[in-house]
Amino acid sequence: MKVLKVIVDERERNSEINSLLAENMLVERKTIDVGDYVVSDRICIERKTVADFKSSLINGRLFDQAKRLKENYEHPIMIIEGNAESFGLAENVVMGAIVALYVDNGIEVIRSRNPKETYELIKVIAKHEQDGSVRAPSLKGGRRAHSTSDYQEFIVANLPGIGPKLARSLLKHFGNIKSVANASLDELMKVEKIGEKKAFLIHNVINQTYMENRT
């Protein structure tokens, strides 16, 4: 049976979760710039108790943290732990925040009832990522772009329907961002996993005349 691995932020002090992880997985404790648990090269998990979530929502830190998670990891996840009745906020406020985390920031939100359930979620996510693949926990996903190729990948990955993997495929095929931008629909569709819909979205965003949004 494959041994699951997880990188745990050394500031994460929940003893129950830490004990369960240590008993059942290979744990490496490091300082993580953002998030609490890294289970692959693309998934970082941020754990928040209901009290943490409420506090960070009220003081405005929640969405700043969400932005940094998405900037640094392809598939960030936030686990909110505890009884929903303990939020002490109107239900529409809580639901609105959770929707905004997903729709505006690309953060998957999962609820858990207690630390043991949080541990079980971490284990299942780690197993999904690590079984039969080379997606071992890595902090490389938590570093900002520093090289030219990092910046190129970041720019292309933010086109609609394109993530880091397809960004690399596009750049390898065309050589640079300018060639991606100048590519026709037919040329874009020659790249593996770029179908007509994705090609149209890329082409449309690059070539449509900019119209400033005003509120």
Image: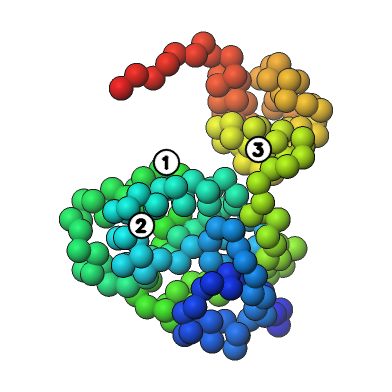
Query: Of the numbered discs in the image, which one, if any, rests on residue 154?
Result: 3
Q: Residues within 10 Å of mark 1 (few under 14, many from 20)?
A: few
Spot occupied by residue 57 in the image (x, y as percentages of width and height): 32, 54
Q: Which is in the foreground here, disc 2 or disc 3? A: 2
Q: State which mark lies toward you, 2 or 1.
A: 2
> Three-letter amino acid code at disc 3?
Phe
Earlier sequence position, callout 2 versus callout 1: 2
Q: Nearer the viewer, residue 76 or 189?
A: 76
Q: Amino acid at mark 1?
A: Asp
**Relative height, residue 12 to residue 18 (above, below):** above
Viewport quadrant of the N terminus: bottom right
Q: Nearer the viewer, residue 108 or 38?
A: 38
Q: Dot 3, crowdedness within 10 Å: few (<14), some or many (≥20)?
A: some
Q: How many marks?
A: 3
Under circle 1, the secondary element is loop
Query: Depth check: 57 or 188 in front?
Result: 57
Q: What residue is rendered at 70% in x and 56% in y? A: 140
Residue visible at 55% across and 75% down in the picture: 123
Asked if one can make out residue 186 in the rendered structure from this viewpoint, the answer is no
Indicate the amino acid at tag 2: Ser
Give the image quarter of residue 9: bottom right
- Mark 1 = which residue? 104
Q: Residue at x 21, y 68 (%)?
A: 85
Q: Which residue is mark 2?
A: 56
Q: CA distance from mark 2 to mark 1?
A: 17 Å
Label 2 Cα crowd, 10 Å radius (few <14 / some 14-19 / many 20+):
some
> Position of 171 compared to 104: left or right?
right
Determine the CA span between mark 2 and mark 3. 27 Å
Between the C-alphas of marks 3 and 1, the distance is 18 Å
The picture places residue 33, in percent across and down from the top left corner, at: 59, 58
Q: Residue at x 42, y 79 (%)?
A: 115
